[in-house]
């Protein structure tokens, strides 16, 4: 039997202070009944994802969407159907949401989101919803004390909540030692830590996930990490973005936006090409390459999740 293909548009409606998200509970008598979900539903014939989103949110919650941007597209195989979840982050809407179909509707803290039972397809969506808008990539730093002073400053003063441990000059043992200590520090500040390298690193240091180089990304046939961990990758073009979607990356960096001292020979994308690439991406994208916090709003305006930077957070 050929599986049904179901295309669904759903909304992650975020509160104005960005700390909360709206979820609804599916009635007990429908498919996946009793589980929590992001409000939305199936595309009607000839509808675009955004049109379906607007219609469904009006029908289910009584709100009018005013501003939304694509967050993530998730392909998932259920036993009886193949589902494509096209999830949008809604920033502005009119009206007071309530369960027009009698379903429970609740604003929940992003930190509590993982305590709610969702359908199996939703794990990548939950990760995308709680993803911060800034990512710190650590600089090469020989002195351990200097390294940790700077990392702690970024966690405390800049309130960075996503860290990628990049240390190409360290050998494996030194890298693991730094990773262990960085993990303890990140945990103290409620930040997530991704390691650079092979997934097996997580057997040694129980960090939150792995960031893949673009080269490693292109060599993989499937997602090498369990669903409980984050997987990100470096990308520079549309082939790499497509591959990242194929193997289920949770997010990517796309670079270089500008020319930088670390990669002086790479041709910069500039905002125009960056935006065009982001529009095709199936997962959140961080702008990388000469980015500062002042660029974060612009990055978001062209569809990115936010910015990733070494220098701007490394002081
Ligand atoms: N809306 C929504 N559907 C989801 C989520 N996760 C997930 O697996 N699904 C699945 O995607 C499908 C969406 O269907 P739906 O029941 O919301 O569709 P609908 O609003 O058009 O309802 P209707 O068909 O009763 O008119 C269901 O099979 C549901 O289990 C989610 O977070 N939100
Ligand atoms: Mg629905």
Image (spheres, rainbow, N blue to C red):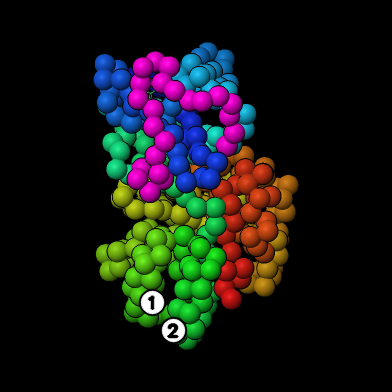
Residue 291 or residue 158, whichever sits in front? 158
Bin the neighbour count of mark 2 within 10 Å (Cα to Cα): few under 14, some 14-19, many 20 and up. Answer: few
What residue do we see at 39% from left, 32% from top? Answer: 106
Secondary structure at badge 1 equals helix
Picture layout, residue 48 above or below residue 20: above
**Residue 178 numbered tag:** 1
Q: Is residue 38 left or right of residue 228?
A: right
**Residue 144 numbered tag:** 2
Query: Which residues make up the magenta segment?
Result: 91-113
Quarter where residue 112 is shown: top left
Do tag 2 and tag 1 residues touch (Cβ < 8 Å)? Answer: yes
Is residue 282 in view?
Answer: no
What residue do we see at 37% from left, 37% from top? Answer: 122
Residue 115 or residue 282, whichever sits in front? 115
Q: How many marks?
A: 2
What residue do we see at 48% from left, 79% from top? Answer: 149
Quarter that holds the N terminus: top left
Is residue 201 in view?
Answer: yes
Q: Is residue 63 left or right of residue 193?
A: right
Secondary structure at badge 2 equals helix
In the rendered image, residue 276 lying in the magenta stretch gets the answer no
């Amino acid at each position: 039997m050929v599986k049904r293909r179901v295309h669904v548009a759903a909304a992650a409606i975020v509160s104005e202070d960005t700390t909360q998200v709206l979820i609804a509970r599916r009635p007990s008598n429908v498919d996946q009944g009793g589980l929590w979900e992001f409000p939305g539903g199936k595309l009607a014939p000839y509808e675009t994802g955004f049109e379906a989103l607007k219609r469904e949110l009006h029908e289910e919650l009584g709100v009018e969407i005013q501003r939304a941007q694509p967050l993530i597209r998730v392909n998932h195989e259920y036993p009886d159907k193949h589902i494509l979840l096209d999830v949008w982050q809604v920033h502005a809407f009119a009206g007071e949401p309530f369960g027009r179909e009698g379903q429970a509707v609740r604003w929940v803290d992003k930190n509590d989101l993982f305590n709610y039972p969702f359908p199996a397809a939703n794990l990548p969506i939950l990760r995308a919803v709680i993803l911060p808008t800034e990512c710190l990539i650590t600089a090469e730093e020989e002195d351990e004390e200097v390294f940790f002073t700077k990392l702690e400053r970024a966690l405390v003063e800049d309130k960075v909540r996503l860290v990628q441990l990049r240390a190409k000059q360290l050998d494996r043992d030194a890298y693991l030692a730094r990773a262990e200590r960085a993990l303890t520090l990140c945990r103290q500040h409620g930040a997530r830590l991704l390691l650079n390298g092979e997934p097996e690193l997580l057997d040694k240091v129980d960090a939150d996930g792995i960031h893949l180089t673009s080269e490693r990304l292109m060599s993989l046939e499937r997602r090498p990490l369990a669903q409980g961990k984050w997987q990100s990758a470096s990308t520079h073009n549309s082939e790499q973005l497509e591959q990242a979607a194929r193997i289920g990356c949770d997010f990517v960096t796309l670079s270089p936006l500008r020319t930088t001292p670390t990669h002086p020979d790479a041709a910069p994308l500039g905002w125009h090409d960056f935006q065009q690439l982001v529009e095709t991406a199936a997962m959140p994208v961080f702008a990388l390459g000469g980015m500062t916090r002042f660029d974060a709003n612009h990055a978001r305006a062209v569809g990115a999740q936010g910015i990733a930077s070494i220098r701007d957070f490394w002081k």
